[in-house]
Image: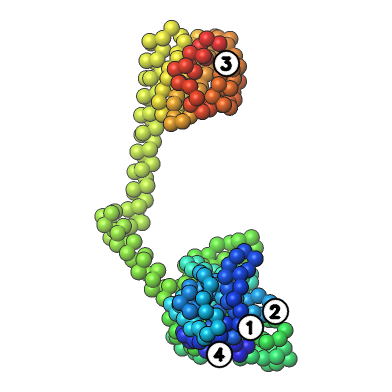
Amino acid sequence: MKNKLYYQNAYIRTFTALILKQEKDDDGNWYVVLDQTAFYPTGGGQPYDTGTIAEKKVVNVEEMDGQIRHYLEGPIQDINKEVTGIIDWERRFDHMQQHAGQHILSAAFEQLFDYNTVGFHLGEENLTIDLETENLTTSEVEIVEELANRIILENKPIETKWVSEEELSQYALRKETKVKEDIRLVIIPDFDYNGCGGTHPKATGEVRAIKILDWERQRKKVRVQFACGNRVSNLLGDKQKLLLGLTKLLNAPEKEMEQAVIRLLENGKRLEKALEQTKESLLQYEAKELLARSNQIVAEVFHNRTIQELQKLARLVIAEDDAAMVMFVSTNETRLQLVGARGAARTENMKKLIGEVLPLINGKGGGNDSFAQGGGDALMPAEQILQQLLTH
């Protein structure tokens, strides 16, 4: 563990090291192995550190076969001299805050309600734990959040300790450790004892705050989304900016915003309903107009009409006159849409008629004897397709 500087001091931002080897992996990605490193590799739910080594960007850090691989944007030219590693401190400290906050929150859920944490994810935006319970109430969340933030305010020390498997019995661990050697405990005295290989701040006060954002049931567990530290203030800033923008758009103060949105949605639904009724009236008028200027054979070419609209219009025509037959073709960019329909007083097979012209446009379709539709590529003019339908 001596070469893992992040375990000696999680606050190390810059270090020097020698390159033990530089190679490409099976996917052709360059990586270096150093004689010591402050870069934390992916593990225990915590993402890897980023930064630079010899001014080359570190894009990933993984521990494989007992070695820590630092994946770089490209190879280091001179590997025989000492190199400087610089940690992206903002990213590292964010991970420290989130990981310590997770320990505090998980311990609070267990102590107050005996809900064990069985999953943890630390992402760039989302931070979640999975609780071994099928239900979680708002009142429980509020109580847990209050305890977690009280532990932060008390600024309790966060200690780390290496112990053997035999020594574990001396500690009231929150959960059983998976490893059997090189066991590292992260301890918040009189509150939480947990095996963990991640990086954490020196005291709970550095976590700053914990805020539970949402939760949802997933199978037989509950997934809790939360934020810690700087993420809380960043989220508050983002949400405040959004709220201020919405108050101006809705012309309503923050406390009345919900009602303003409800009114807006209700008005929108009324307008949509009125628009649909208007469209329906226009289609009915159009159907009568088409019949009035035809001799029961209604054949038309349209542009940019949806297949649904053509189908509705065709149904309105044959409902108006059961002796009518409809042939519609619409051009939509590089596609052709076809609709054929006949009234109950006629005997033509519309599925057969449409099916006979579809091969001309590499098309597919479906329907029945009285009503059919199809579509294909615009390989020939719509007027020509319509003529083909009428002459079959």
Q: What is the CA distance from the residue labelled 4 to the residue labelled 2?
A: 22 Å
Pick the front one: 76 or 382:
76
- For marks 1 and 2, give the CA distance: 8 Å
Number of the front mark, 1 or 3: 3
At x 51% / y 22%, what residue is drawn?
Answer: 339
Work out whether mark 4 precedes mark 2 in sequence or the reverse, and give the earlier one. Answer: 4
Outermost residue to the top: 295
Q: How much space separates mark 4 and mark 3, taking CA atoms?
A: 81 Å
For the residues labelled 4 and 3, say whether their Cβ atoms are less than 8 Å apart: no
Q: Residues within 10 Å of mark 3 (few under 14, many from 20)?
A: some
Q: Which mark is residue 178?
A: 2
Q: Tell me which residue sits at (38%, 19%) in the image.
A: 286
Q: Earlier in the sequence, mark 1 or mark 4?
A: 4
Packing grade of label 4 (10 A; few <14, some 14-19, many >=20) is few
SS class of the residue under badge 1?
strand
Q: Is residue 92 visible?
A: no
Residue 306 rendering spot, x and y as whole percentages: 45, 30
Which amino acid, by three-letter code, is at mark 3? Leu
